[in-house]
Structure formats: C-alpha cells, structure tokens
Amino acid sequence: MLCYAVTPLPANPGNNMLLAWFVLIWALVSYLFSIGFFKKLVKFVKYLMVIYQLPGPKRDPVFGNLHQLWCTPEQCFEKMREWSRTHGPLYLVSMTYLFPVVFISGPEAFEKIAGTTKNIQKGFAYNCLNLWLGEGLLTSSGSQWHTRRKILTPAFHFSILQQFVKVFNKETARLVEVLKGEIGKPSTNVVPLISQFTLYSISETSMGTSLNLDSEQDKNYVSAIYQIGKIVYYRLMRPWTYSNAIFYNLFPTGYKEKKIVKILHDFTDDIIEKRSKSLNTFDERYNYSNRKKMAFLDLLINAKINGKVIDDKGIKDEVNTFLFEGHDTIATSICFTLMLLANHKSHQVLSFLLLLARIFFRQIFFQDQIYEEICASLGDRNHNPEIKDLNELKFLERCIKESLRLYPSVPQVARYLEEDTLVGGHLLPKNTPVHVHIYDVHRNERDWPDPERFDPDRFLPENCAKRHPFAFCPFSAGPRNCIGQRFAILELKAVLCGIIKNFILEPVDTPDTIELVPDLILRTSNESLMVKFTPRNN
C-alpha cells in the first residue's frame, strides 16, 4: 500500500482574499446574468402572448406557417395573396413559432406604420442585403440614414433632372434603333433590352460615367442582380440562414453569394474609379467647383472632400444601392407598362367610328391617346422632348401610375416597430417585424373598384381626391419613401414617349398568362415579357 504525505500550503491571507473576491464576483455576475436572462425571457413570452392574438392562417405549434411557404416562389406569392384576401388587412404569419411577422395589406394600417418618423428602421429582410449594399440609404437607419438622405436629396433637384432628360433621349434613340431590328418578329422579350437601357441611363446620369456598349461586364452585372434576388428569397424562407455569420461561413449558397457580390462590387468600383479620375482633369475640376447642383456620385465625392460624415465605403454603399434601385426597379416598371399598353392597343378605323368607339370602348385606345398627346406636346414627332414637354404628358403619366399600381416594382417593404403601435384595434408591440404587401394595398377594392382592370382614369385628380393617401405607394410612403421617384417617373415618360412615337405595341404576353415572382423586385417567373413591335406610320 502506497502512502502519500500531503504537505499543507502555507496560509496566505492575500491569496485567500483574492479567491474570495473572485468567487463573490463570479456569483454576482452569474446572478445578474440569470436575472437579466429571466427578465428578457418573461418579456419575450409576454410579447408572444400579445402578438398571437392577431388573426392569421392556422399554424403549427412549432414550425408556425413555415411548412406552408416551402413551395415554388410563384406558389408562395399566390399563398400570401390568398392569406391577404382571407385575413387582411392585418394578419400574422410565423416563420417558426418564435419568429412571428405581421403582414399588412390595407392603406390605413400602412399609414400607421410608415406615416410616422418613429418607424424608420428597416425590417430583418434587409439584413440579407448587407454584404452587397452595406449601410446605404436603403438599409441604414437612425442618424446615418438622416445624414445620407440630407446629402443626397439635392441630386434630384429640378435643374439636375433637366440635364438628365438629354441622356434619356440619347439612350431612348439607341433603344429605338435596336427595336427597329425586332420589326417583323412575332414577339420580342423586352426585359434584357430595357434592362440595358436603364443601366446605361443611370450610369451616365447619376454616376457621370458612360458604359461600354454591350460589354461582358455589363451583362455579368445584370445577371448577378437576378441571381442575388433568388438568394435573398431563399434566405427569407429559411430562418436558420438569417445570421450572416452562419450563412456566409457554413452554407454553399453563402459562398455563392460572396462570388456574386464580388461581381457587383467590381462593377461599381470601376464606375467610382472612372468618375474620380475624370474629376482630376483641369476642365472637370473647374466645372465641378463651379456647379451649384451636382449629380448623385459627384455629391458623394464632394461630401467626402469637404469632410462630411462619409468615407470611401459609404460612397461605395450608396453607389451600389442607387445603381440597383435606379436600374432594376425602373426597368421592371417600363417592361410591365409596355405589356399593359400592348394589351390595350389602337385600332385603325375611320375618325367617326373612332370617336364612337372611344365613347363606348375607350379603354382599347390608350396607345392612340398617348401618341396624340405626344404630338400635341412636341409639335413635331421627331422633336426630342424637354422636361417641360414630359411634364405636360398627363395621360401618359396616368398610364404609368396605373401600371405601377398593378405591378409595383417593389411588392413588399419591411419595418421594425420602434414603439408600441395600435393598428385597427390591435396592439403591435415594439420590435415587431412588419411587412407591408404593397401589391395587395394596390388591390384594395374600396379604393380600387374592379382592381385587376387597367384604367388610367383612376388617376384623374377628382378620383385621386377620394382615395386614402396611402392607397397608392409604388415608391413606399412616409419619411422613408423613395428618394428617386421623380427621376423614375421622368425616365419612364421619356422612354415610353420615344417608343410610342415609333411603334404600335401588339400583345403577346397578357396579364392572365404571366406568373409573378417576388424576390428583390417583382418579376415574371421566366424572367421575360413578350411584346410585338409594329412600325407606326402616321
């Protein structure tokens, strides 16, 4: 048997005191942590008890409604529409029981959320865009958002937009020549052609940089935009990918997104570098320093030079944001408008019969009306419109707005509530994620009778006055509305003016035959919209 002699350590009062303090602090921290955790747990349970009082589709006690949304994007879109019709204008969908989301599809509820300066924090869905867009105007909140909005607002001043019309006319003329090559074909997919038009337009107007025609880099950028939209949708349907740290390090799709984002960032880096170099030339420096109003990218560069709160990363974030918003969303709006106008084409009949037909079947002559309005405004069909001419095209503007009502480029917007909010008799607690289904806000039958019908006269002044102010919100609404909405309407008018002057649009795709998919923006499931172009001879 082995025996061990144990020699006691000499007593050291200092060590004992240190150990005692360590144990005491550890116990105190553990206690405070447990108390804090318990309080948070109680608070969260109370939150769930309140939020689950809201109406909504039947849910699983663990997975919520998630299993019902595991379907194709087209089916998911229709499912959300069905829930909106059944449970709207305010209802609850849970992405697992612990992650409830409030959906809104009525203008009154939307006003409660967006019509205040309190709820300007974007919802969790925008976190999926952080790798790409950083903290640009679309994704940022708080003081940074206020500062950036203030810096960028002058970029959409009337005098700046006036200069942009020349670029719109130049790019429209180039597009018209491309479309002339489509004459005689049974159908033309307008999506890639219009996407190229808006990309060239936004680059030359807001970024002050001309792109190389039909370059591989441009095509890769457009393709990357489509791919990243699908990835965002993929993540929204899978709550376990909401953490960026987990998604980008553990999921193959996360690795794929990193590669796609590199393509997008390389494109914008190239634009920023080109513009910065051009501003270093003597002539550009002279013109730059003497301009009272500057375009988008120039404003950002000027803000950095003058020591305002923006750095190189901030400039990059804003350029990435506005290139996306000013290219992809406007392209989608133009494409849907062309499709709708094609389905309401003109008929070649005698003037007297035309007059009678317009009295009884007015809706089928929208293209004729637009053409006549353009001729009256411009005088000469071959004259390039100026901003004052475009502002006079009231019927065309009503057609554009009706198209934006039926097919809003951004079908949903998301917010986090920053205070308790009472909506329609329901209490929505602070920190509730809210998604506003703009697509269905625009189909509220009280404000929009026969909502699927294309009727530009809904936007006559007397009809607008009868509607809720938040019933039409294609550019969102409230303090966080789209900063570039006047830019968008002006570009839509310019390009549609050029197309209608030269072509009669014949229907191929119809509203009944297309399938819609909501990712970052509203798209068709096959990423195409088909129209036939016939030369206008009158």
Image: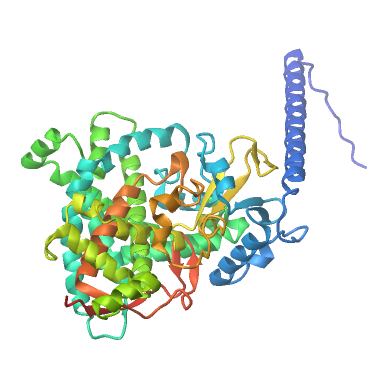
- From the viewer's perspective, is 217 left or right of 479? left
- From the viewer's perspective, is 250 left or right of 12? left
Residue at horizontal 47%, vertical 73%?
525
Observer-nearest residue: 18 or 101? 101
Observer-nearest residue: 504 or 67? 504
Residue at horizontal 45%, vertical 73%?
511
**x, y percentage for residue 401?**
38, 57
Observer-nearest residue: 320 or 373? 373
**x, y percentage for residue 237?**
59, 61
Q: Looking at the rendering, which quadrant does residue 202 occupy?
A: bottom left
Residue at horizontal 12%, vertical 33%?
290
Q: How many marks?
A: 0
Q: Looking at the rendering, which quadrant does residue 88 occupy?
A: bottom right
Q: Is residue 380 above or below residue 165?
A: below
Q: Is residue 52 above or below residue 368?
A: above
Q: What's the colour scheme?
A: rainbow
**x, y percentage for residue 209?**
19, 52
Q: Looking at the rendering, which quadrant does residue 454 occupy?
A: bottom left
Observer-nearest residue: 162 or 517? 162
- From the viewer's perspective, is 150 left or right of 74? left
Q: Residue furthest right?
A: 1
Quadrant where the C terminus lies?
Answer: bottom left
Q: Is residue 490 above or below residue 478?
A: below
Residue at horizontal 76%, vertical 13%?
13
Q: Residue furthest top?
A: 13
Question: Is residue 140 in view?
Answer: no
Quadrant where the N terminus lies?
Answer: top right
**x, y percentage for residue 166?**
16, 54
Question: Is residue 461 in view?
Answer: yes
